[in-house]
Amino acid sequence: MDREDITETAKKEFSSKVNQQRGEISSKIIKEPKFLSEKQKNSWNNNGFILLKNFYPQNSCSEMNSAVKDIINTMVCPEDPFSHAYEKDGYIGIREMKPNPEAKTIHDEMSKIFRLHGKGIFNDFIKNKRLLDLLEDILGENIDCFLSQYIFKNPGAWGQPWHQDSSYFPFDRHPQVGAWVATSPATIENGCLVILPGSHKEHLHEHVPDDREGSNYGYTEIKDQDFKNQTPVTLETGDLLLFHSFLMHKSYDNESKSKRTAVVFHFAETGTEYGQLDSPTNEWISVRGSGLN
Ligand SMILES: O=C(O)CCC(=O)C(=O)O
């Protein structure tokens, strides 16, 4: 395909899929945790997230960054015509729709790489005992990781608009948990996440297509909410944000001169049903409990 904007029809079709569960509520709260502190439990129940400073070693963050560079080198041949999506060795790569005038290599033009968690350092991460203990208090004893993505946020890249991740997950139960690991500092200037604390108690709102010309396929936006209590989440390399899949969040554009990188994993209770057709970006891998047997 040429580097033309995604058509209005494709954007509308996608947002009709993400609105399938509109109106649903996720009311489960944590009562008697085994591993979470009182403060972490309250943060989850009241605000919909838990922030863990310094969770993951800096050298492991660098290892993740280089592993992704190697994947792109085998996935995208710079001479090939523009494509918004790539597939290689089970990984799915997404290139920015909006060209970055400063881009020198293909690495400066990538947006996301999906399906990382089956192999290498990404697979090690989803088996981390400290992480799984925390997730057990939220999701129960039987846990799968079903989604992972590396997000480049190169200089000039746009942020993702306000959304609730559950609108992308047409599953038979809630919540799922996002684990957002900063593999570089995330600042206001380079495009950190912005959350609306407490919004995990809201129903799933309508998500309309992101109407910025040149926005990436799959970006949708909540418009019917008051965001005045929004809070930017600035992070250091190695910090981890765990967040509820109903929590409203967005991210800023990268207005700096360097990349803002992160890896986001998503976890669900084992046995979660995904309906008739699962997303090609999902891969269900059991990490604790009954699914391992
Ligand atoms: O990291 C970002 O810029 C956006 C990530 C996000 O919104 C998500 O993972 O749902």
Image (cartoon, rainbow, N blue to C red):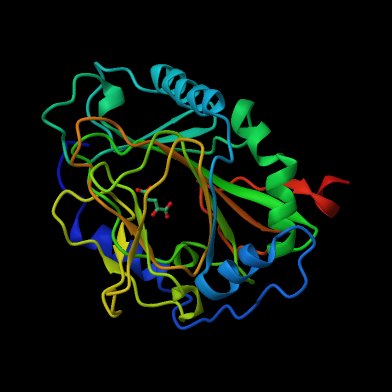
Quadrant containing the N terminus is: top left
In the rendered view, does 145 fall on the left or right side of 78? right
Asked where in the image residue 15 lies, by quadrant, the reply is bottom left
Most extreme residue toward the right is: 293
Q: Position of residue 14 (x, y in %)?
A: 35, 62
- Total marks shown come to 0
- The image shows residue 157, relative to residue 49, as above or below, that is above
Q: Position of residue 170 (x, y in %)?
A: 53, 67
**Of the pair 91 and 52, the residue shown nearer to us:** 52
Q: Position of residue 155 (x, y in %)?
A: 22, 34
In the rendered view, does 147 fall on the left or right side of 152? right
- The image shows residue 94, relative to residue 170, as above or below, that is above
Q: Is residue 41 visible?
A: yes
Residue for point 51% across, 37% down: 238
In the rendered view, does 270 fall on the left or right side of 72? right
Q: Is residue 94 visible?
A: no
Asked where in the image residue 79 lies, by quadrant, the reply is top left
**Of the pair 160 and 34, the residue shown nearer to us:** 34
**Of the pair 5 and 232, the residue shown nearer to us:** 232
Q: Position of residue 270 (x, y in %)?
A: 74, 58
Residue for point 76% across, 66% down: 33
Residue for point 46% across, 62% down: 165
**Of the pair 190 and 114, the residue shown nearer to us:** 190
